[in-house]
Amino acid sequence: MFEASNRILAVLCGLAVCASAAVDQCKSIGWATRSGRTSTEFNVTGGGNATPITVTTFADLQKYAKDSSPRVIYIDGTLGDGWSGRTGDRLNITGSNKTIIGLKPGTVLKAPIHISKASNIIVRNIVIQGPGSNAEQAWDNLTIENNGSKNIWIDHCEFWDGQDGNADVVKGADNVTFTWCIFGYKKKSSHNLSNLIGSSDNEPESEGKLNVTYMFNWWQAANQRKPRCRYGNVHVVNNLLTGNASITNGTDVLGVSAGHMCKVRTERNVFINEANPIYTGNANGTGVNEVIDNIFTNCSGNTKGTGTSFTPPYEYTSFMLKASEVEAAVKANAGATLKSPTECDANYVEPEPPTPDKQYQAEKGTITGGVSESSNGGYHGDGYVNFDKGGDVVVNVKVDTAGQYRFDIDFANGSSEARSLAISAGLDTATTSFKTTGGWTVWETAEVLVNLAAGENAVKFATVGGNDGPNIDQFDVTLVKAAEKDSSEEKTISIRPKTAAVVEPSVYRVDIFDTKGALVRRMNVESAKVSDVAWMTRGLPAGLYVMQLKNANTERRKFITVK
């Protein structure tokens, strides 16, 4: 399944992978995955494994969105006849356990969405283009409201030119996450007010609720409310906010705003050409906005936070991007960009990592041009290998099965630049760059893929080009893929990508582009290998890339960062 490899962050070192942390673009995160304001987990599944229904009329879409059965609904074509003010088509989602997905990228819904007293909802891959904002109490492009509206995940959607607003969460709704969405305005107006959380300072049904996460979203040319909140604990993390003076000129431009009894954690976002990116004028003595590691480029007005907010009860730090990576990631992925409704699976569960088959101590090997040391702390076993220029160590590694193995190598590099090692077994060699760790007692783990034969393998770790190497300590060896067998004898089958010009359905064509759209690598890869991001990106320079996988039946893409 491609979802298992649909990762944001794949941390690479030089010619081989060092380590990888990941977020599945299609995996629910944030407040939607919790019950109330607690750490109790909630699995957002929407319609779950219900047989998908493809709808081609707005009437059918509305019928299934209201009924009491779990539903997975694919929208085929542009549905709805539009609206103005509070008249026209409006999609009312009042039945729980629904997944509603645009069948193709850019699927347009000519109707705003209203979610009321419904839970466990997923809305994905839809564009809603409003008629333009005004100061009247018109419909928002999306409204989530009333007690009972909870555990809602809005993903890869676009909300443009909402009349009253783009996407509001109000009146006791709770546990909502927005990921990879665009909230924007194309038409100039003084009422381009995007995202409101809590509609009044006197909204007692919202006390302790309105907990919302915004992650990997893009606000474009909104005057205010990015977001503006009351009552909730609101997490604004890894988003991009960009101003446009041709649309906002002549109006008050306010950014993230914590209002009455609202605590906001504004973390590792990027603000570009924004006025008052952190607005404190709505705090009412009770609002808090903690500002953590954001980037402000060509911004005016306040950028400082107030007070301490809250610690999110869900895990997010392992896949949170650095602020410097946010702009490229969001621009490459936000919006209704998914190629098919099956590109994301709401039921995807991250598999448990395999346990190492065996562990080895490098200092127990045969060392040439280096020494076994124990003077720098933090190592395992009796010590570690300190290489001299041209040095190597050979360790005997015995495995029962021929195939591809992952080596997790503990290393320290206290020098000022990366150092390389060539790791070889038989005819297979992986040349790997080990980054600086900031000190010789600071140990990190590098991940390298090596082919091993069944039985004993003399694995050699050697410095490269007459240069020095890092110190290496313990390494774990884990089987990734067993070699295939033919009918007559066991033999290792090449796991290198096929180079045939014709790509069969069981083979993906993999294209890797840089952020400017230039093709930097093309290969044909067996379907069993498409989850191996490390191997497919081996040797790419550090930077951000878009990876596209295509065969006769499907086309998918993912974003990766090479370091």
Image: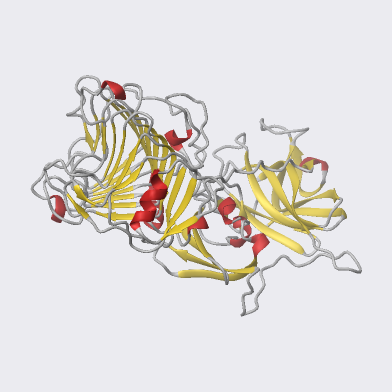
Q: Quadrant of residue 352?
A: top right
The residue at the far bottom in this view is 501
Q: How is the image coloured?
A: secondary structure
Relative side of 318 to 443, left or right: left
Residue 300, percent across and down?
18, 42
Looking at the image, residue 363 lies above or below residue 313: below
Q: Residue at x 54, y 62 (%)?
A: 540
Looking at the image, residue 535 lies above or below residue 118: below
Q: Residue at x 41, y 62 (%)?
A: 76
Looking at the image, residue 527 lies above or below residue 42: below
Relative side of 557 to 214, left or right: right
Q: Quadrant of residue 471?
A: top right
Relative side of 449 to 130, left or right: right
Q: Quadrant of the N terminus?
A: bottom right
The residue at the far left in this view is 250
Looking at the image, residue 346 lies above or below residue 423: above
**Image label count:** 0
Q: Residue at x 67, y 72 (%)?
A: 498
Residue 119 in view here: yes
Residue 358, percent across and down?
80, 42
Residue 155 in view here: no
Q: Nearer the viewer, residue 324 or 114?
A: 114
Residue 103, percent across and down?
44, 60
Q: Nearer the viewer, residue 552 or 258?
A: 552
Residue 457, percent across and down?
84, 54
